[in-house]
Image (tube, rainbow, N blue to C red):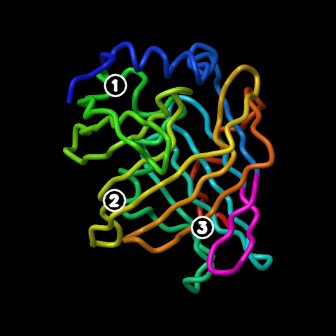
Amino acid sequence: MAQDIKLDELLDKHFKAIGQDKLAKVQTMKMTGKVFQMGMEMTMNIIKKRPNLSRTEVEVQGTKIVYAIDGQNGWMIMPFTGSSDPQDMPADQLNSAKKEDMDGPFFNWKEKGNKLELMGKEDMEGTPVYNIKITSKDSTVANYYMDAAKFVILKMKAKVMSQGQMADVETKFSDFRESNGIQNAFKIETMANGQAGAQITFDTVEFDVPVDNAIFKKPDVAAK
């Protein structure tokens, strides 16, 4: 298919649309909202800090689930498995989570070892989009669908290894809002193998809030 735009031009328009120049200067990011899954509504808090620290807390029925990365290693607290002690995050889940940095896969993609290909222009439920294929340095492949008019990402499709099995995962992004000159999707919907997964709606997105690095460290169970 003949292209009406080159990849570099498209990425430049995308970075301008989302306020990447401002985002690159941000050191921390805090998002609060709700998760709807399996008929339940849960509260969610996500905290990210450069260079590669993150912590997600989900509260359901008075119980808190935690996923965290301290920059290199990942851990989680899953009370519904019968233990409230922190456990090491499975390797496939850790590898996937470490790719989700604050800037996204396009920014500094060459330095990250990613390979990008502009696959063409398509129609996504009536909206013209550009299909950008990303091959990560670990050879995993994902396709990102960028709004051809607004240059924000509307959907991501990928094959993801989860609990030892490959799954076709689809994530949709909508309800874009500007915070401090930075565009974020305030609604995220996931699907796995064609089945509806989680729906996330954010209430607030804040930048450069004070964050103590201690919250990313795996708790010492022996110190209890």
Residue at point 29% right, 58% down? 159
Identify residue type, mark 2: Ala
Q: Quadrant of residue 39?
A: bottom right
Q: Nearer the viewer, residue 165 or 125?
A: 125
The residue to which callout 1 is attached is 109
The residue to which callout 3 is attached is 221
SS state under label 1? loop
Quarter in which the C terminus is drawn: bottom right
Where residue 113 sits: x, y (%)?
26, 29
Q: Is residue 213 above or below residue 23?
A: below
Q: Quadrant of residue 102?
A: top right
Q: Is residue 206 above or below residue 11?
A: below
Circle 2 crowding by C-alpha within 10 Å: few under 14, some 14–19, many from 20: some
Identify residue type, mark 1: Trp
Q: Nearer the viewer, residue 89 or 202?
A: 202
Where residue 75 sits: x, y (%)?
50, 59
Q: Nearer the viewer, residue 79 or 179?
A: 179
Circle 3 crowding by C-alpha within 10 Å: few under 14, some 14–19, many from 20: few
Identify residue type, mark 3: Val
